[in-house]
Amino acid sequence: MKQREVWLKNATIVTMNPDRQILDGDLLIQNGRIAAVGDVDPAQAVGAEVLNLDGQVVLPGFVQCHIHLCQTLMRNHADDMVLIDWLKRRIWPYEASLTPETLHTSAEVGLAELILGGTTALLDMGTVHHTDAIGEAVKASGIRAHIGKCMMDLGDEAPAPMQEDTDQSFRESLRLHQTWDGVDEGRIRYAFAPRFAVSCTEDLLRRVGEAAADLGCHIHTHSSETEYENEFTMARYGVSNIEFLKQVGITGERSVLAHGVHVDDDDCQILADSQTCICHCPSSNLKLASGIANIPRYDEFGVPVALGADGAPCNNNLDAFIEMRLAALLQKPFHGPQSMPAERVLQLATIDGARALGIDDEVGSVEVGKSADLVVLNLDDDPGCGPGGDVVARIVYTAQKHNVQHVFASGRHLVDKGELVGVDLPRLMARARQDFKEVARQMERWC
């Protein structure tokens, strides 16, 4: 996929810039970047392909800060379970059964869904093995990603392939960092990904904290998704889950903790003081009955927050629109109708997610000089979104992924008129069905 020079004309542009400007006008993409916003000088756009949007909405591509591309083939096969049973009876046996080939297919299917839904950047946690397969799928997809090998060196309840030696887990993570961090002019980065305190030794977590600080890279883990994690760290280490992560060096401005449902004020203060980001995953937390993260409280403390869909088996969708709508609605019965306004939620899904990944100088808002990571929505021709109203509210409360008409990532046209460019979806999905059958056969030895 080549970068294209494109003149988007007659658009409503939701910039998410510091002034939160909403403009009626044009946008010019050149050399993979946004060259002009609002008014475009025709002399600057000579030779550009013209795309007349006729009032369609342009906004930054969505940034999802907690995804499991490795789990996509398990969608619809791990429903109606609590987290620990879900892991032990479904997810760990599934991940133990993946090969590089089936993992690559899983990642391809997940990426196809994400791109069609307007996601152009993500933070992914892989499984214990074969992380290079995820890197290759991301590289081919054209979108921006932080990837990381899942690390698990504690506990004996996971299948044997999921149980790691501490030294081996750490060495492999360092190799992957050397291989993938900075690929394609920084489009792909590496993040250390210890699964959670329950499946990682204190030694491994301390090594991760030190290495991430030395290398200047991100840490991606789960935290406080259920009360069990607090009970575990309290029994083993005498402190809450968040306090334990602080003690071993996992918190910090380059750390993203998925979920953060079960926290107290002391935990919030730790997160705020260290500027550790919580990735809110509302659909996953509801489906696994983990609870509802108190986002207004995080905002009050000054804790950074982003959004993510989590994995397909605990959500059944990788859809930023669903996560935005739920993120807005869930808080209102508890904190009032103005507790999570639409603009705040769109901020979580764009510039705040970019800031959590340290890429807000490149993406997350529509500004001259930034990478052309953009989504175009057709709202006016959809009776479910029209006939008008506040454009940000329409995006958060009414839009769905079928409204996505175009997606650009680094100036590459990945979705054109609602169709994924360069991907034979029927062929991909036929391969995915066949690959899942093979994975399911392998799972029988671990279930």
Image (cartoon, rainbow, N blue to C red):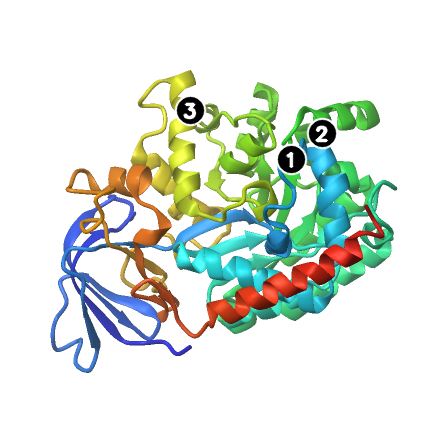
The quadrant where residue 171 appears? bottom right
Please, what secondary structure does the residue beneath circle 3 have? helix
Q: Residue at x 24, y 54 (%)?
A: 378
Please, what secondary structure does the residue beneath circle 1 have? strand
Mark 3: few/some/many CA within 10 Å (<14, 14-19, 20+):
many
Q: Which residue is labeled 1 in the image?
A: 223
- Give whichever of discs 3 and 2 has the lower sequence position: 2
**What's the CA distance linking mark 3 and mark 2?**
23 Å
Three-letter amino acid code at the position of disc 2 = Glu
Q: Residue at x 46, y 30 (%)?
A: 302
Three-letter amino acid code at the position of disc 1 = Ser
Three-letter amino acid code at the position of disc 3 = Gln
Position of the C terminus, as image quadrant, is: top right
**What's the CA distance linking mark 3 and mark 1?**
20 Å
Residue 353: percent from the left, percent from the top?
45, 46
Q: Residue at x 41, y 59 (%)?
A: 116
**Contact (CB < 8 A) between labels 1 and 2?**
yes
**What's the CA distance linking mark 1 and mark 2?**
7 Å
Give the side of residue 101 with respect to residue 341, left or right: right
Mark 1: few/some/many CA within 10 Å (<14, 14-19, 20+):
many
Of residues 304 and 446, the one nearer the viewer is 446
Q: Which residue is labeled 2 in the image?
A: 229
Give the side of residue 100 with respect to residue 444, left or right: left
Of residues 220 and 93, the one nearer the viewer is 93
Q: Which residue is labeled 3 in the image?
A: 331
Question: What label sits on residue 252 in the rendered view?
Answer: none
